[in-house]
Amino acid sequence: MSETTYRICPRSGMQFDTKAEKLMRWNAVAGVLALLVGGIMALGVILTRWPSVKLLDAETFYLVLTAHGVDMLLVWIIFFEMAVLYFTSSTLLRCRLATPGWAWVQFWLMAIGAVIGNVAILSGNSSVMFTSYAPMQASHWFYLGIILFAVGALIGCFVFMGTLVVAQRDKTYEGSIPLVTFGALTACIIAIFTLLQGAAILVPTWLWSLGVVKEIDALAYRMMWWGLGHSSQQINVAAHVAVWYLIAGVVLGAKPLSEKVSRMAYFMYILFLQLASAHHLLSDPGMSSEWKVLNTSYFMYFAVMASMIHGFTVPGAIEAAQRKKGFTNGMFEWLRKAPWGNPVFSGMFISLVSFGFIGGITGVVLGTEQLNMLMHNTFYVPGHFHATVVSGTTLAFMSLTYLLIPILFKREIAFPKMAQAQPFVFGGSMAVLTVVMMGAGTLGVSRRHWDMAFSGAPFQYEWPGAAYLMMGMTGFFGVLACIGGAMFLIVTVGSLLIGKKLDDGQISATCTPHPKGSVSDRATAHGDAEHVAVPGTVALAMLLLATFVLYYFVNWKYLSEVWGLS
Amino acid sequence: MSALLPPSQRNWFKQPIDKMEWLWIGLAFVWGMILFFMMIYWHINGKQNLSNETYKSTREMYSAKAEKWVAENTVRKETEREIPVVKAKPGEDVYLIARLWEWWPIVEMEKGQTYRVHLYSMDYNHGFSLQPTNINIQVVPGYEHVVKMTPNQAGTFAIVCNEFCGIGHHSMLGRIYVK
């Protein structure tokens, strides 16, 4: 019944539905293109917030900041996630992609939406930031662009679901779907909730910008919009955790410590992550404290618990695999002798550590009802989410790209030395950047603010000297991070254009099984790692917990010193 | 297509969980409970909790109240813009207006006294970011938020708007004197 053919990659044993393969490539390339645009915008943002440089005027700065947010948080990540969805379904399950025609509708709707949105922003009448809080109004094209983009993404989710059905019906796998696909399914379910909630607010807002709807309640907008804005970051969490498992499996043959636990942790994401829109309303009027406490904690921190479980089991899986290979000396030989020269691995591991230690801990502190008042809308907020979305998601996706260049794009990586250095330059500078951004935020520096000197204000406020130091460091490490991002683009685009062409592999008219022992086999294996003690991971986990506890209570101490509020 | 390679350990659900992993799950659970109950504990024993007292209001209603209060309690005017400095009465209401692009008026308070500070935005979302003490509250148009504040140190405090509100956002600065 299938009208497609299947290519078996000779390097990995992975099977690509020829139609799906093209879609994966187009979606990934569109994502990388958005990363380029968003990256140029990032440079504009960072060079303006660097107090001694202050490159752009206020109007351009807010325009560039809006474009940076939209292109990075939406366009780059969601395009790439579409490629991930098609890969984890049709390739890992070795079946055809359901409805490739609809998948092209997904691609073109998202592409057209992204172009419309970008043109609206660049034309200068939609500098409303990524959040576009009503009653501040953008051009109606801005909302239309985002709506088209979201509808496209929603179609992609259904194509993924349909492909799972195809695989099950054609019996291309046995037992359960692989853990990585299960993670992608989690991301997909969260995405469907999220995009529908986004439609529920963006469609009325679009009608309001056209004058059809008279008024949008400012608070209702914030609540509904964050159902899109925050929850879409939870899609990323589920997706990049799936990528961590995939890379650990592919590069090291690692299996989770317990597949049952890892799957339960994903299931907890589905149940609880959706409550997170409250994180943005903790310092708002109108919602009760009970509502805030219950929602901000994902109903008693069950989603945080899930992340802590993944944060233990991914390095644990790596440690177990390494110890089985004979790296058993001391606590950390497995880590020292890990394949740090392979950017697929190094990027993934830096992503894991940065997400856990920096993004995760600060996210919980920021999402604590009362502590939020110390940081709400300060520079702490972008500091935190760059640690999650950039160090976490973007770096994980970059690592996956390095894996996919030979497999999916059939090219050798051009500039391998640059590729090797890239995760360290990008991940390292991003780690310092996020910490100094949060440092500035702790001192009160505002986010989305053009001028720390308040020019034109009737009086002055002088920020502490340390705040200027932190912002100067933000500028320096931000530029370094931009260079790291540019290195990724040079390697990726270079590989696609001038990388040595690799063998296509056999074309088959029917689906074929996983070749035993191949990369493809490792990416989809079931079952737990054989029981090996993982003392290094336990030590890392305890260090994480100790840091977490200490930092959490330091912030309560800090809160207890500010003005009384009741 | 049925006899594809059977996965190595298909019955993953029956495999036992290692005790170190159980320990970590237990620790994560306990820590989650501490995180949760800490917020409730602070509502009972902490001195910094954001008030839930909110009213729906309109620009006209709010500015009438605020302007009346300013007219009755102004002690002097400051800056070229002649911004009124209003002496607040301990225990009573203070009305602050956020609008493009100012926090109006200037308020004088006393250390250790409690005030009912009303926050209201006349147009877009704004931010109430009190510096250098660093308290940050969102101000949403249409909603009058009453926050009881007790200054615990004397000095000159700035109210920085930290929600993007347009081209003049960076010049939106207010002031509170605490004696």
Image (cartoon, helix red, strand yellow):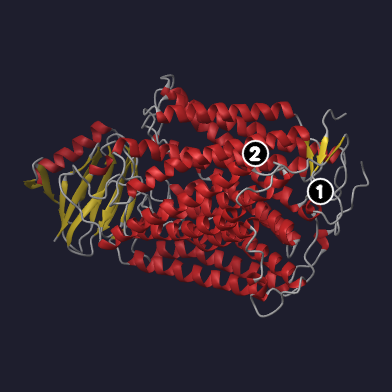
Q: Secondary structure at mark 1?
A: loop
Whether residue A286 is visible, yes or no, is no
Residue A516 in percent (x, y) is at 87, 54
Q: Which residue is mark 2?
A: A82
Establish if B105 lies above or below A469. above
**Quadrant into which the C terminus of chain A falls:** bottom left
Whether residue A528 is visible, yes or no, is yes
Q: Amino acid at mark 1?
A: Gly
What residue appears at the point 51 percent right and 55 percent down from the top-left corner?
A: A426
Establish if A454 lies above or below A142. below
Q: Which residue is mark 1?
A: A13
Count of all numbered marks drawn on residues in the image: 2
Q: Secondary structure at mark 2?
A: helix
A402 or A155, nearer to the observer: A402
- The residue sitting at the right extreme is B3
Left or right of A272 on screen, residue B156 = left
Q: Quadrant of residue B64?
A: top left
Establish if A351 lies above or below A214. below
Q: Quadrant of residue B131?
A: bottom left
